[in-house]
Amino acid sequence: MKFMKLGSKPDTFQDQGKSIRYVSSELATDVTIIVGEVIFYLHKFPLLSMSNRLQKLVSKANEENSDVIQLVDFPGGPKAFENCAKFCYGMTVTLNPYNVVAARCAAEYLEMTEEVDRGNLIFKIEVFLNSSVFRSWKDSIIVLQTTKSLQPWSEDLKVVGRCIDSIASKTSMDPLSITWSYTYNRKVAVSDKITEVGMKFPGKLESVPKDWWVEDICELEIDLYKRVMVAVKSKGRMDGSVIGEALRTYAMRWLPDSIEALVSEAHSIRNKSLLETIICLLPSDKGVTCSCSFLLKLLKVAILVGADDSSRDELVKGISLKLDEASVNDLLIPARSPQATVYDVELVKCLVNRFMARERSSRDKNIPPKSTNDFILGHASWLKVGKLIDGYLAEIARDPNVSLSIFIELLQSIPDSARPIHDALYEAIDIYLQVPYLLFPFIS
């Protein structure tokens, strides 16, 4: 982590209770400044020599025969003001990624510009940001996280935008040139072998994966995460598969696992917003770059939290392109009222119909196969979906609310050519027939 030390004099700020701060000095204090709930007893000269705003406020206070100044809505609160005051006194102040944005916003509030004094605080902080912080991967992320509580100052000063650009630019660098540490913790990486820029490596490094960066930015809240991902995509240098992996990792990090947590009154609105944001960030070719399992998990959540129709339609479109990659468990999507079935069978029928329509259209454009074997080899996806749906039929066959018509419709949605072997289908029918009164209600 980068840091910058300003000033050289000892820190003589002291406490008197929880809400009073003063400078220990032989000179009596001559100005009282209130920031939030903290009262500062300070000296005019060092402060006015650096702050244009305090010059104006002190002048106004003198006209009113007062020595008390209240700073309203001060960015960063008492701590940020104290750091600015210490700078004015020439005391040692250490800036780091955790406090630099607060100091920058506070300095702007106090108008600590070059017009007041050369080498003033704003100038020094900008040098630190541009020469150190924004060049560091981790520091840029830390700084971006701190901007949340300093709006609108951090936005107006373009700190947010510069952080986002710094992060997005680094994600699209050639992985072979990555030398800073990262939190990638999967088996393909040995994170403790990767150190900060400029340090020599003791031995040969493991190759850095293209998605080395995805876990680090998962710490960002969804609004900042969205802006970073939009910037990453706008660079046009990131594979859609890596974008998909980044979104999958973020969804796993922030979306609850349990249905109760997803739909809880306290978090349902947040979960809905988070999900819709993830969906809108999916690559345009999500049917190719995102796994079918991931898209189906998003669809399950979308149904549970009541996501808008456009979000659900986008997921259905992507899933239907690669339904042959799904598993039976992926398709066990809970049904919602007014459906009486346990699982959403109608949704699965829709997915199958869309997949088959696309496959038929694709087949019609190709030269007819010379033999049955050629057909089977050329349409492996049909066979996979046939096997998938037979397995799904076996699952829903246990649901007494699945009507005969629904069961048959789904059964017949798969063409004969996608079901060369019928063993799994017979097993599903046998399970369904274990509840004969559903098929033949007139039998007592």
Image: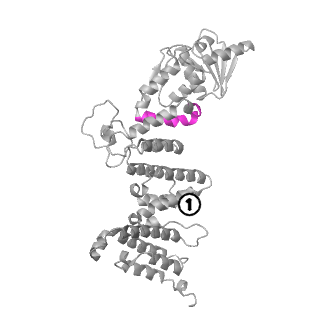
From this view, report whether residue 26 is shown above or below residue 443. above
Query: Quadrant where the C terminus lies?
Result: bottom right
The reply, left or right, for residue 224 in relation to residue 52 is left
Q: Which residues are magenta?
A: 137-153
Residue that protrudes farthest toward the top in the picture: 26
Q: Nearer the viewer, residue 55 or 168?
A: 168
Q: Is residue 91 visible?
A: yes
Image spot of residue 376 (x, y percent): 31, 73
Q: Which image quadrant is residue 193 in?
A: top left
* Overall secondary structure of the magenta section: helix
Amino acid identity at mark 1:
Leu
Residue depicted at 49% across the width and 74% down the height: 396
Residue that protrudes farthest toward the bottom in the picture: 443
Q: Nearer the viewer, residue 63 or 78?
A: 63
Residue depicted at 64% across the width and 10% down the height: 28
Image spot of residue 117 (x, y percent): 54, 13
Q: Which image quadrant is residue 43 in?
A: top right
Residue ID for mark 1: 304
Colour setup of the view: one colour
Q: Is residue 142 visible?
A: no
Query: Quadrant where the N terminus lies?
Result: top left
Image spot of residue 375 (x, y percent): 30, 73
Q: Is residue 160 magenta?
A: no
